Image (tube, rainbow, N blue to C red):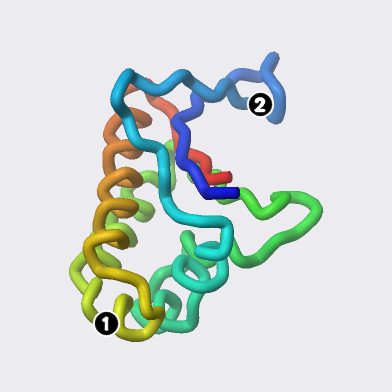
Amino acid sequence: MSLDIFVWTPDDDAHAGRNVLADPPDTSTAVGAEAFRHTLWGSAAARRLGATLLPQLADITVENRGNLQVSPGQLDAFERECGLLADNVERLSAATGYDGERILRYLANMRHAVERARAVGGGVIIW
C-alpha cells in the first residue's frame, strides 16, 4: 500500500462531511509507502525539526484510522511544515535513510495539493 494525498471540500451530505475531489490529469498524489507513516513523516527526526501535522500519520486511532485530514484553516500551517521539512531535507534524509530527492518529490506533491485545495476552499487528506 501507499500513502496518497487528495483534495476535499466540506459537504454535510457526503461521507464524513467531505467530498473528495477527482485530481486533474497527470497529477501525482503519492506521498510515500505505507511505512513512511512511521519511518519518515512520523519519525523522531521529523518531530525534532518541528513537524506536528505529518507525524499524526503515525498516530493511528479508531477515530482517524491513520488518516491525516487538514482542514481549510490548517492549510497555511501544513504548507509551512512542508517547507520546513524541505528546507531540512538533508537532515531528514540522513536520519531516516530515505533519498532526499524522493522526499522533496513527495513534499512537492503535498504543496500542489494545498494549492488545489485553496482554489476550491477545501482541505487535504492523506490516507
Residue 38 in percent (x, y) is at: 56, 70
Q: Residue furthest top?
A: 13
Q: Nearer the viewer, mark 2 or mark 1?
A: 1
- Residue at label 2? 17
Q: CA distance from mark 2 to mark 1?
A: 38 Å
| Residue located 54% across and 49% down the image | 2
Q: Earlier in the sequence, mark 2 or mark 1?
A: 2
What residue type is disc 2 on? Gly
- Asked if 67 appears above or below 16 in the picture, the reply is below
Which mark is on residue 91? 1
Residue at point 40%, 38% (across, down):
29
Relative to 26, residue 79 above or below:
below
Q: Return the x and y of residue 94 as percentages of the image width and height.
A: 30, 84
Which residue is situated farthest in the right direction here?
62
Rendering quarter of residue 26? top left
Number of labels in the image equals 2
Residue 127: horizontal and vertical position, in percent?
58, 45
* Residue in the picture at 56% in, 64% down: 35
Nearest the eye: 72 or 41: 41
User: Where does residue 31 sit, x and y in percent of width and height?
Assistant: 42, 50
Secondary structure beneath disc 2?
Answer: helix
The kind of residue tagged 1 is: Arg
Q: In this view, which residue lies farthest toward the left? A: 87
